[in-house]
Amino acid sequence: MSTSAEAPGTDNATIKQAIADAHLPSLIAAVVHLTGDTSLITGDIKPIYDFFGDGQGGLTDAQKARVQAAAFDAIKAYLAKGKPKAQPLPMDTIRRMMTFVAGAEIPERYVPFLLEELALEGSDVKSGHWAEDLPAAVKKSFRVLIIGAGMSGTLAAIRLSQAGIPFTIVDKNSDVGGTWFENSYPGCRVDNPNHLYSYSFEPNYDWPQHYSTQDKLHAYFRGVAEKYGIRQQVRFNTEVVQSTYDERRATWSVRLRGKDGKEETVEANAIISAVGQLNRPKYPDVKGRETFKGKSFHSGAWDHSVDLKGKRVAVIGTGASAFQFVPAIAGDVGSMVVFQRTPPWLGPTPDYHEAVGEGQKWLLKTVPFYAQWYRFWLFWMLTDGIYPMVQSDPAWNGPNSVSAPNDMLREMLTACLKMQTGEDEAFFKKCLPTYPPGGKRSVRDNGVWIAALRRPNVELVTDPIVEITPNGVKTKDGKEYEADVIIYGTGFQASNFLQPMKFKGRDGVDLHEQWDGDPRAYLGITVPNFPNLFVMYGPNTNIVVNGSIIFFSECEIRYIMGCIELLLRKGYAAMEPKRDVHDAFNQTIDAGNAGMAWGSPLVNSWYKNAKGRVTQNWPFPLVDYWDRTRAPNPADFEFETKKAAAAE
Ligand SMILES: Cc1cc2nc3c(=O)[nH]c(=O)nc-3n(C[C@H](O)[C@H](O)[C@H](O)COP(=O)(O)OP(=O)(O)OC[C@H]3O[C@@H](n4cnc5c(N)ncnc54)[C@H](O)[C@@H]3O)c2cc1C
């Protein structure tokens, strides 16, 4: 969370240390704010988009020294003058600074979007001033039920409470945080830099690491939920079982079940489902799983009572979670066999486990606009900046890649892997993906994964598993690997959206029967036949390479608040998307996904459902989702009037 505490120390040594830790292009932008002098961004220094560089835009040592000297003088003067308020800069200067910091020409259509991300006014720009003119009584007449108190549900509760809309929030867990409460496996951490993976309106200048561990993430989300008075309101240990729409009254009846099995029904005018995509563990469909005599558990429900010291451990899966817990436990276990179906692409990330420097924290807290530009840089670098590298070129027919830029990325990642695996050609081949980069979410690599697999007590097995036996794991070649413990790193039931809950909508239509294994929603949020059901992190709102889910959730809740405002302002009781609008949208999504690395026929992943359709991912740049969710278009919806609802 943002900290208003003054950073200690303003002496020369502190400033020098801070500058040494700085992201220099962002620091230069901050210096322009402090001095109004644009010469640093209009001269010979021109940062480049250096995805594989040292993160300093390819500046030469001489340029770095020049920038550091100018920054020192500017910060010193700013502190000596008692931290005067910076004068606003003209828009053309801001525009130039965007290109400068990003190291790329920013297309015009991105400017309003990036200006909002940049949030130079420092306010919570995405909250809007929600329907301030609507009487409190009108707002209070509308009650929302939020299902889930993870990152998305907490956000929804914050926005509703800011708006004065009454709500009930329930979660099956005993605490807030969702993903970051449940996944307590050793080594669990975020894969997006934390200064980006935080709510835009609640920056945390004290993240201990660039990619902090689960306990820090959980503390952050709990802290935010407490600060906004949300955690105190959550009905914990309460699961939503079924929601039924009452057409006559235009309300939802929602059946809740407590941990003790007791049930009750509550009513709401609208439901916000915030149950996540990665919430229900998935186990492999292998015979004999229940026959295993030792201990076994899933990474998403780690059994901390099992002491792994000295044990023979079998790990099934090499996805994002296994990638984090294998190196964390490899030194403790007696022996470990890692069963791999497909290897992940490793994205070089030297600072993956590194602490954020004290100087960097000082800059974030002390120098105006440094934090905003740093977040802006991360945002561009890791979101739409990388998007072209994972787009398919229909004319391209190179192996294991989908376009020339994608092939270049593949070659660079292959060379990085080769550097780690050395002369061991057989091992290199086992670790080298045979699908295009971006086909699946790549993992952040600082060398610990390959180092763990090369330990003398660890073996990487790529022969397919055919059976779990009472004693261990059997592979196709007939070998049986004995184990005391099996750990499933096999992911989540991602495409079973909103399950195992039941939703009965208009005319008693069942949501999962309507979807028939192929979940679809308009903008991932609304579904025909399900009036006033709003979904967060719904179908096609996940991302593979570009961005953080928090960005999507912030867009979704703004849109949902816009929908509620439409209802209240016009006196409507309910809304649902028009079927043709919904269908046309989904056709665009399918065509978009077919043009991306993860939609390639070369790729088989959890992003695709049993029918081979990509149900998880947003296929376009983030700017498009932002643009489409700024406000609902009334023409996209069927509305139900209160009068009609009451008269039936
Ligand atoms: C190990 C792991 C690492 C990840 N790393 C990243 C990352 O680096 N960057 C990124 O952007 N995303 C990452 N993700 C995705 C992550 O899930 C999202 O970023 C985000 O946490 C989703 O928040 P959410 O609130 O939408 O869903 P969740 O965090 O899954 O929360 C859903 C909540 O709903 C509750 N719930 C579910 N069903 C019911 C029910 N029927 N009744 C009541 N309550 C219910 C659950 O108990 C849970 O608290 C990661 C996911 C995992 C599993």
Image (cartoon, helix red, strand yellow):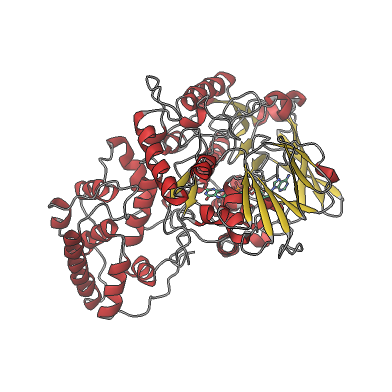
Q: Is residue 386 left or right of residue 136?
A: left
User: In which image quadrant can residue 13 be found?
Assistant: bottom left
In this picture, residue 92 sits left or right of residue 534: left
Percent x, y of residue 292: 83, 47
Q: Is residue 193 left or right of residue 178?
A: left
- Can you give x and y, in whole percent of width and height, for residue 553 in the image? 53, 45
What residue sits 42% from the left and 34% below the top?
390
Res 645 visible = yes
Q: Nearer the viewer, residue 371 or 484?
A: 484
Note whether 444 is above or below 108 in the view shown: below
The answer to which image quadrant residue 227 occupies is bottom right
- Residue 40 point in image, percent of width and height: 16, 57
**Front-lying residue, 595 or 470:** 470
User: Where is 522 relative to 223, above or below?
Assistant: above
Residue 317 or residue 562, whichever sits in front? 317
Residue at horizontal 75 percent and vertical 54 percent from the top: 485
Residue 340 % position (x, y)? 62, 42
Is residue 333 shown above or below 132? Answer: below
Q: In the rendered image of this protein, does residue 337 appear above or below residue 20?
A: above
